[in-house]
Amino acid sequence: MTYRAEELEMQAVLQVAAQMCAAARTAPKARGVDCIHTLVVTGQEKDSLAEELRRLGNEMEIAFYLRDADCLDKSQAVVLIGSEREYRGLGSPCAYCGHGSCEGCAQAGGHCVYGPMDLGIALGSAVGAAADHRVDNRILYSAGKAALSLRMMDENVDIIMAVPLSVTGKSPFFDRKKKS
């Protein structure tokens, strides 16, 4: 039996994507509150994500969104990692949000700092898993905004970061050409 490199590379990408989701899930969370969500997109869903990123880039005249959409085109899969808006209930002793209390933060529509911090830790764990397996990746907030625009994750998720994955001879995520 023979196995084509492209098939094995795609298997490797999907296995690493699964390990990244596991790493994000098991990453430490403030006060033990888990508000992290993960999703992996390939094929048509990945293409839709790239097209939405292009649409946003053109609409808002943001050239690097167009460049990042090209990165999605060159990837084999995209891992989405998001965080729910969740208030941890620490009250006025915390006030890291700048609103004095959790109630003040909620009333102002602000973000409790712990959700985004947990998201950052989850992202670090996830990209570390990809790096451990030599799968090229890059965190793209732009593609996360496109995923949010498409409502690709649960409705409670209001911050998403995207991590495209690639197994090729040269990483498409670095030495990128500037779009004009």
Image (tube, helix red, strand yellow):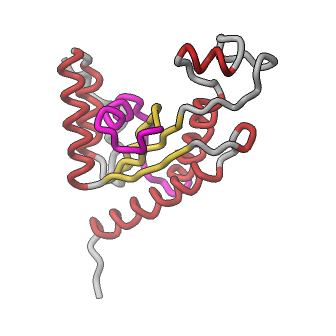
Q: Is residue 141 above or below residue 37?
A: above
State the residue at coordinates (28%, 83%). 2
In the image, residue 141 lies in the stretch drawn in magenta = yes
Left or right: residue 126 versus residue 152 is right
Q: Nearer the viewer, residue 129 or 148?
A: 148
* Residue pictured at 24% horizontal, 19% vertical: 63
Q: Position of residue 115 (x, y in %)?
A: 60, 32
In the figure, 117 relative to 64: above or below? Answer: below
Q: In the rendered picture of this protein, how many numbered marks are placed on residues? A: 0
Q: Position of residue 21 (x, y in %)?
A: 51, 54
Q: Is residue 76 magenta?
A: no
Which residue is drawn at the image coordinates 53% and 36% (left, top)? 84
> Of all residues shown, which one is farthest toward the right?
93
Residue 134 position within the rendered picture, expressed as x and y whole percent measured from the top left: 48, 54
User: Which residue sits furthest bottom?
Assistant: 1
Q: Nearer the viewer, residue 51 or 109?
A: 109
The N terminus sits in image quarter? bottom left
Q: For residue 67, which quarter of the picture?
A: top left
Q: Which residues are magenta?
A: 132-156
Name the residue located 19 percent from the left edge and 28 percent from the top edge: 55
Counting from the top left corner in percent of width and height, residue 80 is at: 42, 44
Quadrant assignment for the C terminus: top left
In the rendered structure, the answer to whether residue 120 lies left or right of residue 173 reads right
Q: Is residue 129 above or below residue 92?
A: below
